[in-house]
Amino acid sequence: MSNSMHVSALVVLAVLWLNPFVNSEILSEPDFKYDPIRKTLLIWMEKDMAEDADRLSFTSNFERGEVELVAGEPYKKYKNYEPKKASLRKGNGEFCVDLDVYDPKVEGDHKRIFWSMRRDAIYHSWDNENWEKRFASPTMSNVNDTDMKSLSFSIKNGMSPNQPEVFFFYNYDKTRIYLQPGTPFTKATNFDRTVIIMYWDVLCSIFYGYDPTTDGNHQRIYWLAKEDGVFHSWNNKNWQKRKTWRNDGC
C-alpha cells in the first residue's frame, strides 16, 4: 500500500473518531443518518410510558402530518437549526401541549435535544441523562408545582347533555374546539395572556383564559361553562362567576 493510501486511511479514521455524532447507537439505525452539511441538530422525542398508555402524537413545523410516539420507539432525526415547534396531543386531543422543541435562544450551542414524555410531566435534556421538568401534567394534583415551567389550563362543559353544543376558539385560532359534557379540554402552555371566544347555541362569551394581571402566579387555571354563565377557579373546587352569556355577538 502506498504512503498516500496510508495517509488517506488515517485521515478517515481520525474524522470518524473525533466526530461526536458517530457512535455505535446511531450507526445501528438504518434510517437515522447524519448530514454534515445541512442537518446537524439531533431531535429526540420519546414516550417513556407503559405500552398500554394513551396514544400520544404531535404535529409540528418540521414534519408533515401527524407523528405518533410509540413506547420504546423514540422519534430521532437530524434537522437544521431553525426554531422547532410542536403540538403534543394525548388520546383524541383532550390534553395538548404547545412545545418549543428547539428554541435557539434557550438551547444555545447544544446540538442534541432530548424530550421525554412521562406520566407525570414532560422532561428536557441535553445529554439523555440529566433531566429537567418542563411541563407538568394537568392530571396531577391541584397543588402548585415549583418545578413546573408551564401553565395548566382547563375548560369544562358543565351543562346537561341535552343542551346545545358548546365550542370555543383558542387565542383567535380558526379551529373550533368542541366541549363534550364531562370531558374537559386541558392544555399546558406558557404564561402569555390568552383569549377565549366561547359559543353556546346563539349566545357567546369572550374572556381572557389566562390573564397575568388577575391570575398572578397561579399555575393552574380552570373554567366551567354553565347555563347561567362562565365560572373561574384556581383549584377546581372554589368557583367564581366571571362572565355571563351575551346575545349581541362577540
Image (cartoon, helix red, strand yellow):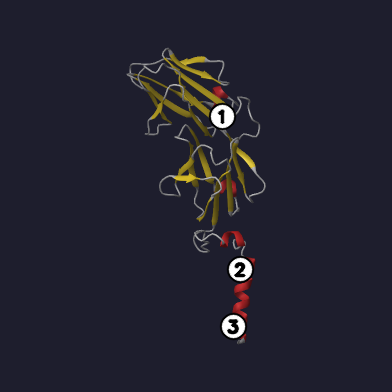
Query: Quadrant where the C terminus lies?
Result: top left
Q: Quadrant of residue 138?
A: top right
Q: Which residue is drawn at 50% across and 48% down?
A: 83
Which mark identifies residue 195? none
Q: Do the residues labelled 1 and 2 touch (CB within 8 Å)?
A: no
Q: Which amino acid does label 2 sit on?
A: Leu
Q: Is 231 drawn above or below residue 83 in the view shown?
A: above
How far, Cα to Cα, is label 1 from label 2?
Answer: 46 Å
Q: Quadrant of residue 9?
A: bottom right
Which mark identifies residue 5? 3
Sequence-wise, the earlier of marks 1 and 3 is 3
Q: In which quarter of the image is residue 159?
A: top left
Labels 1, 2: front one:
1
Q: Residue at x 60, y 59 (%)?
A: 25
Q: Which amino acid does label 3 sit on?
A: Met
Which mark identifies residue 16? 2
How far from the left and from the top, in percent, is residue 53?
A: 54, 38
Which mark identifies residue 139? 1
Front in this rendered view, residue 207 or 168: 168
Q: Is mark 3 on a helix, strand or loop?
A: helix
Sequence-wise, the earlier of marks 2 and 3 is 3
How far from the left and from the top, in percent, is residue 183?
A: 46, 25
Sequence-wise, the earlier of marks 1 and 2 is 2
How far from the left and from the top, in percent, is residue 29?
A: 54, 59
Query: Quadrant where the N terminus lies?
Result: bottom right
